[in-house]
Image (cartoon, grey):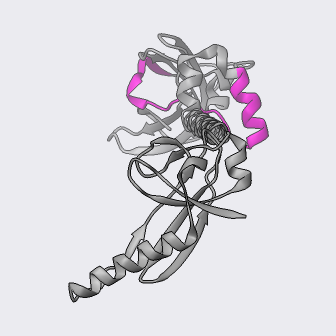
Amino acid sequence: MRVITHCPACQTQFFATEEQLNQHGGKVRCGQCMQVFDARAQLVSISDSAENAADTSNSAEEDTSVIDSAVPAEILAQPELPASTIEITGTETKAETVIQQPAYLGDAVKKNRFRAGHAGNKSRAWLWALATLLMILLSVIQSVYFLRDEIAIYYPKAKPYLLQACQKLSCSINLPEKIESIAIDDSDMQEDADHPGLVRFTSTLINSGNHALAYPNLELTLTDVEDKPVLRRIFKPNEYLPAGTNIADGIQASEEIRIKLAITTSDIAVTGYRVFVTY
């Protein structure tokens, strides 16, 4: 059974049930002015409420204007009474019940929402951190892949690991090819006195750089008396280096490599030569 009570402070009327009034001995808090009062002591009969509404309507008609008086009303428990609203228009009375959550339940809901939001933020933070870590890792791997040759030069201890990785990735590690750092020194060519038509060429390759370089190719051109080329030959590292030389290690910084070649000229008259290094 529902009854009507009103707030003695602001005269706002409310619907309430016996069950609601029994929860705290009739004590309620006005949702309009927040005044705590005894709802049982402020009961209003339905007929009186309707008459008040009718009087209000008649007064409005005399002023040649119609005013719909919507009186919001909430019964807030102390702390857990449900709230009600009543709307009075003319002589009709419409009631809408709005359930107000208990204060302790509201606090629990707020805490749960805060915890859920905090957990969601924490999860998103972990996802961002993981994504950032993966991007950094991919960037490092990509940099190592494209700079593997330079890394092997400046960090020789890392070269075995790079070679193992390249075996799985089908790549290779190459020494730098800086021809400007390779110098040719002490070159000479002489005919072999014991073997007609055979000349012996000697020279020295020097790495003037600060790190190991790939062995270059040796281009040797023999010329006649008019300094015109009559024979030209390009020797690869495995052809001019001493047997047992590890070509993959390259020519080290400041290292000198002595070259000795025997060249057959047949019946061609040779009086001079030109020598170059190329990659």
Q: Residue furthest left?
A: 63
Q: Quadrant of the N terminus?
A: bottom right
Q: Quadrant of residue 187?
A: top left
Q: Residue at x 67, y 37 (%)?
A: 172
In the foreground, 207 or 241: 207
In the foreground, 25 or 167: 25
Q: Residue at x 28, y 87 (%)?
A: 61
Q: Is residue 191 left or right of residue 195?
A: left
In the foreground, 204 or 175: 175
The answer to whether any part of residue 220 appears in the image is yes
* Residue 278 position within the rendered picture, expressed as x and y whole percent measured from the top left: 47, 37
In the foreground, 15 or 256: 15
> How many marks overall?
0
Q: Residue at x 43, y 52 (%)?
A: 32
* Residue 16 position within the rendered picture, expressed as x and y whole percent measured from the top left: 63, 58
| Vertical side of 273 occupied by 27: above or below | below
Q: Residue at x 50, y 38 (%)?
A: 279
The answer to whether any part of residue 141 appears in the image is no
Q: Quadrant of residue 214?
A: top right
* Residue 131 position within the rendered picture, expressed as x and y whole percent measured from the top left: 61, 41
Residue 171 covered by magenta stretch: yes
Q: Quadrant of residue 159?
A: top right
| Vertical side of 9 occupied by 2: above or below | below
* Residue 147 position within the rendered picture, expressed as x and y whole percent measured from the top left: 54, 33
Point out the stretch of residues depicted in magenta. Answer: 160-189
Residue 121 covered by magenta stretch: no
